[in-house]
């Protein structure tokens, strides 16, 4: 689609991939509704974007999909794309894992992502156009020890994305996911040094590498649906 004057919603926009995506889609001429919990960061980012508004919220809030749609319609009169990006990564061994943290990760990475995708899929179907990009991971296609639950959430995103793509084929609504390898972001900030060592890599990606991929998917003509896009650091071998 021609992104100029189109409107995107980005979850998890207060840092990392979501923030970079906001800058990238802003540069492409889109108006944006950004969301995350950190109101101050959202306020700062909004002030740097050409046409943007924000909704500060927990992504698992049941009212968030409706609030985001209302924000888009009230501010810009339309919505054309959802970047379903908010996520966390809790890892650990069988002995160390905190099951409550794991269940909260499932609510954020899976339940909230599904809720938002279904809500906007319905809206996009009614208007016969729109695109949903879900943030998967290389962990949605591969398995790693001590990352069982995180890999599980991203495998769920893969399967969900592909089923939705098939269901909506020919409706004017596109669906795809991005599968990043290691990106240097805050995602790893609560990890122990040993855990960080496990995924240490020379020259990880930066968030803008993924943001460009998101823009690329959205910029395709209407006869093209990129269903999945794997982007890894050139040095990543697992
Ligand atoms: N970095 C990587 O190597 C990598 C690789 C593959 C896939 N990914 C995926 O990329 C996505 C973005 O991650 P990132 O690397 O950019 O990490 P990040 O810098 O930590 O950003 C995560 C974003 O999600 C938001 N978020 C987290 N929990 C939330 C909650 N409960 N409610 C609302 N918002 C919440 C955070 O905002 P607040 O804290 O302000 O709420 C933040 O804006 C995730 O889905 C992640 O799984 C990342």
Image (spheres, rainbow, N blue to C red):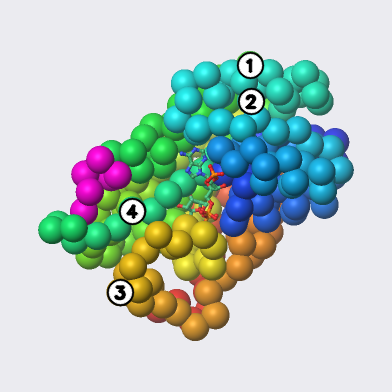
Q: Position of residue 112 (x, y in %)?
A: 44, 32
Q: Main secondary structure of the magenta part?
A: helix
Q: Which tag, 1 or 2, sits closer to the chain's start?
A: 2
Q: Earlier in the sequence, mark 2 or mark 4?
A: 2
- First of labels 3, 2 by sequence position: 2
Q: Residue furthest front?
A: 40
Q: Which residue is mark 1?
A: 126
The quadrant in which residue 83 appears is top right
Residue tagged by mark 3? Answer: 194
Q: Secondary structure at mark 4?
A: loop
Q: Nearer the viewer, mark 1 or mark 3?
A: 3
Q: Residue at x 13, y 58 (%)?
A: 95
- Mark 1 and ligand 1: say if the CB distance to the nearest ligand atom is below 8 Å: no
Q: Which residue is mark 2?
A: 68
User: Can see residue 93?
Assistant: yes
- Residue in the picture at 54% in, 62% down: 185
Give the Cα separation between the discs numbered 4 and 3.
Answer: 14 Å
Q: CA distance from mark 1 to mark 3?
A: 49 Å
Q: Nearer the viewer, residue 206 or 36?
A: 36
Q: Where does the image place residue 114, in percent across and percent down from the top left?
A: 44, 31
Q: Is residue 101 magenta?
A: yes
Please tell me which of labels 4 and 3 falls first in the chain.
Answer: 4
Q: Earlier in the sequence, mark 1 or mark 3?
A: 1
Q: What segment carries the magenta color?
A: 97-102
Mark 1, secondary structure of its residue = helix
Q: CA distance from mark 4 to mark 1?
A: 37 Å
Report how far apart the C-alphas of labels 3 and 2 lie in the structure.
39 Å
């Amino acid at each position: 689609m021609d992104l100029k004057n189109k409107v995107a919603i980005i979850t998890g926009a207060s840092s990392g991939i979501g923030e970079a995506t906001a800058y990238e889609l802003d540069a492409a001429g889109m108006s944006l509704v950004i969301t995350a919990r950190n109101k101050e960061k959202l306020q700062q980012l909004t002030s740097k974007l050409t046409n943007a508004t924000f909704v500060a919220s927990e992504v698992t809030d049941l009212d968030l999909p409706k609030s985001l749609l209302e924000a888009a319609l009230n501010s810009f009169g339309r919505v054309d794309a959802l970047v379903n990006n908010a996520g966390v990564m809790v890892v650990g061994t069988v002995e160390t894992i905190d099951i409550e943290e794991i269940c909260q990760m499932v609510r954020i990475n899976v339940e909230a992502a599904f809720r938002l995708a279904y809500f906007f899929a319905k809206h996009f179907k009614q208007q016969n156009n729109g695109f949903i990009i879900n943030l998967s991971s290389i962990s949605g296609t591969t398995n790693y020890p001590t990352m069982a639950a995180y890999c599980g959430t991203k495998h769920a995103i893969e399967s969900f994305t592909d089923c939705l793509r098939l269901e909506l084929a020919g409706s004017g609504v596109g669906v795809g996911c991005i599968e990043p390898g290691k990106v240097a972001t805050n995602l790893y900030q609560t990890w122990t040094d040993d855990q960080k060592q496990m995924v240490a890599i020379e020259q990880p990606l930066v968030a803008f590498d993924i943001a460009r991929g998101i823009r690329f998917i959205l910029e395709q003509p209407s006869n093209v649906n990129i269903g999945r896009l794997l982007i890894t650091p050139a040095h990543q071998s697992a």
